Image (cartoon, rainbow, N blue to C red):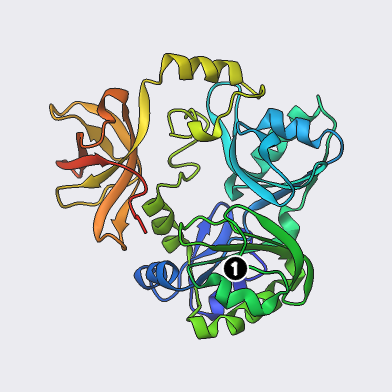
Amino acid sequence: MKNTSLTEKHIALGAKMVPFAGYNMPVQYAGLMQEHHCVRNAVGVFDVSHMGEFWISGPKAFDLIQYATSNDVSKLFDGKVQYSCMPNATGGIVDDLLVYRVNEEMYLLVVNASNIDKDWNHLSELNKEFGATMVNKSEDTSLLAVQGPKAAEALQSLTDMTLSDMEYYTFKIGTFAGVENVVVSTTGYTGAGGFEIYFPNENANEMWDKIFAAGAPQGIEPIGLGARDTLRLEMGFCLYGNDINDTTSPLEAGLGWITKFSAPFLNSENLKAQKEAGVTRKLVAFEMIDKGIPRHDYEIADASGNVVGVVTSGTQSPSLEKAIGLGYVPTAMTALGTEVFILVRGKSLKAVVVSLPFYKK
């Protein structure tokens, strides 16, 4: 079990620690409900240092990333971030990721913690055709997600970089909390606004302390992985390993918007043919009508009781005070308002297909 540089901080704060993606991680501190509402209404801090960071550079960096990812990297400019996925050769997804363009020959890829080794090996194999310079800085990099509507106000005193005017999915590199060459991006997994801050491990404890001191007037709190999951699900954001994996097509998962066919990428011809033919199943959002909470791997049935799909994510939404979920169903059952039935402990509970995001600001 790996630890982040901040593990002792979490334990000292009384966090409940759980294994996650090979790391010892805080799942909650004061409690999931309080932490969830803190991020929606004020500002909270997640330690997400378990995430992976790959630096790709050189004259062939663009070519490698354009081929390895489904989105169009040519649309990026310096200081812009792009959400994307890495398709595999069989129609599924190796991982979803963020692509940061520093300049035309320098990119940062941020990948999921559970997929660091798999992603690195996949990219390294593809890179044999390109020859870009690849450096894996995952073990050396700490990452804090400072999320919520008061995040910019809480952090501004720590840097000369103007935070309030940064557009969504952009980043700056500068001095932050006395540390040079810190990457500060307007990304995150909560839908509540805020920043993700990348810096060397050796600065982690000092960075944590300074952020909490600066954000005290805004009511800043530490937030665990439990609230991270409820926040992301309220927005309908996919979680790798739940909603997408090596067997799910990005088109089935509703990720057609990051699957661009303007330039060839791995397996793009097959995915293009799939788009033209139409997929046979899709990931849908649903709200429970009957009382009950959907969970990962619960079966989905039609009105006749035939099992037609599976729940990939589900929870009781703290913001909406109702049970919500995502799951794959046949394309014929994806229209808004369609009734589906979730099989919960032998009972068939009614739900209805709804639009995303569940939580609308």
The residue to which callout 1 is attached is 164
Task: Kindly indicate the quadrant of the structure image that contains residue 157.
Answer: bottom right
Q: Secondary structure at mark 1?
A: loop
Q: Position of residue 316 (x, y in %)?
A: 28, 57
Question: Horizontally, is 285 left or right of 343 in the view?
Answer: right
Going 20% across and 34% down the picture, which residue do you hit? 338
Task: Please state which amino acid type lies under the numbered disc 1.
Answer: Ser
> Residue 305: where, in percent of width, then height?
15, 29
- Relative to 89, say whether 354 is above or below: below
Against 5, residue 100 (above or below) is above
Please give the name of the residue rendered at 39% of the width and 57% of the height, measured from the top-left corner: 230
Image quarter in which the C terminus is found: bottom left
Left or right of 329? Residue 233 is right
In the image, residue 211 above or below residue 197: below
Give the image location of residue 33, x and y in percent: 35, 69
Q: Is residue 302 left or right of residue 183?
A: left
* Mark 1 surroundings within 10 Å by alpha-carbon count, few (fewer than 14), some (14 through 19), many (20 or more): few
Relative to the observer, which residue lies in front, 164 or 290? 164
Nearest to the observer: residue 37 or residue 290: 37
Question: What residue is at 68 percent from the left and 31 percent from the top?
Answer: 68
Q: Is residue 66 toward the left or the right of residue 333 in the image?
A: right
